[in-house]
Amino acid sequence: MIQPVRAAAFAAAAFLLTFALDGSPLLASPDEAAAPTARFFDHGEAAADGSDLGLNADLSQSVQRLAIAPAGGHSESFAAPEPARRSLAELVVDHAGATVSDAEQHCLVSAVYFEARGESLEGQLAVAEVVLNRSRSGRYPATICAVVRQPAQFSFVRRGVIPGADQNCEAWRRAVAIARIAAERQTRLLPENVLWYHANYVSPGWGRRLARNTRIGAHIFYS
């Protein structure tokens, strides 16, 4: 009796050892194929296929699609940072070689030069914006030159005549750059309803009837 029992035990052990080496499941339904098994050495010997790894010839697109999965399991995408906004001083440098292209631009440059050449870049830009705001407002003439030449509006204009300026000086070249920046709206300081300003050493009666917006340098601006 002992020998048949031992033989049966050895047979069972041999069956279990065969299963462990083969990797097949103990049970599988007739309608369900056994799932393929993957061993460590299978991965180590497998050839690397670029398509399987999700590699892309366009490296920049791959970087933009980079996602990192934190511990919680939710992926977080990181987009490329937006370029930093350029300062007014940097924009002026960009337009260092700009020239006056037409009569309208000449009128705007003249307004900046004669009204604010001693002011900061922001103060010059604000004067240019007031001139442009007026030309777009519907309350003043529709062209820049007509706005600048309008009687009793800009003190440097005499009887509709804009005086000549030294166009070889640094102040004129800076005014050209400021006028170009303002006309192209590359940056803005004032709202579009700011249509008036005056020097801070005078106190005109009309200033009390308007809403003060801001002061930049020697000028106070109103809407």
Image (cartoon, rainbow, N blue to C red):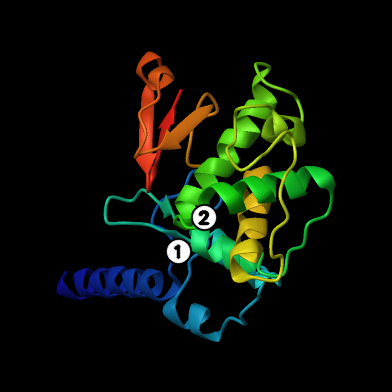
Quadrant containing the N terminus in the rendered view: bottom left
Which residue: 50% across, 78% down? 43
In the displayed structure, does residue 150 sit left or right of residue 127? right
Residue 54: x and y in percent read 61, 65
Q: Nearer the viewer, residue 131 or 56?
A: 131
Residue drawn at x 67%, y 26% is 151
Identify the mark nearer the N-term, 2 or 1.
Answer: 1
Pointer 2 with pointer 1, Cβ within 8 A: yes
Above or below, 137 relative to 73: above
Of 50 and 174, nearer the camera is: 174
Q: Position of residue 130 (x, y in %)?
A: 56, 34
Per the image, the residue denoted by label 2 is 34
Between the C-alphas of marks 2 and 1, the distance is: 7 Å
Q: In the shown orientation, is residue 17 left or right of residue 47?
A: left
Q: Residue furthest front?
A: 159
Position in image of residue 143 (x %, y %) = 77, 30
Q: Find numbered disc 1 in the image and state the secondary structure of the residue it sits on.
A: loop
Residue 191 pos. (x, y %): 49, 30
Q: Residue at the spot x=64%, y=70% of the render?
A: 169
Which residue type carries mark 1? Ser
Return the residue nearer the eye: 206 or 160: 160
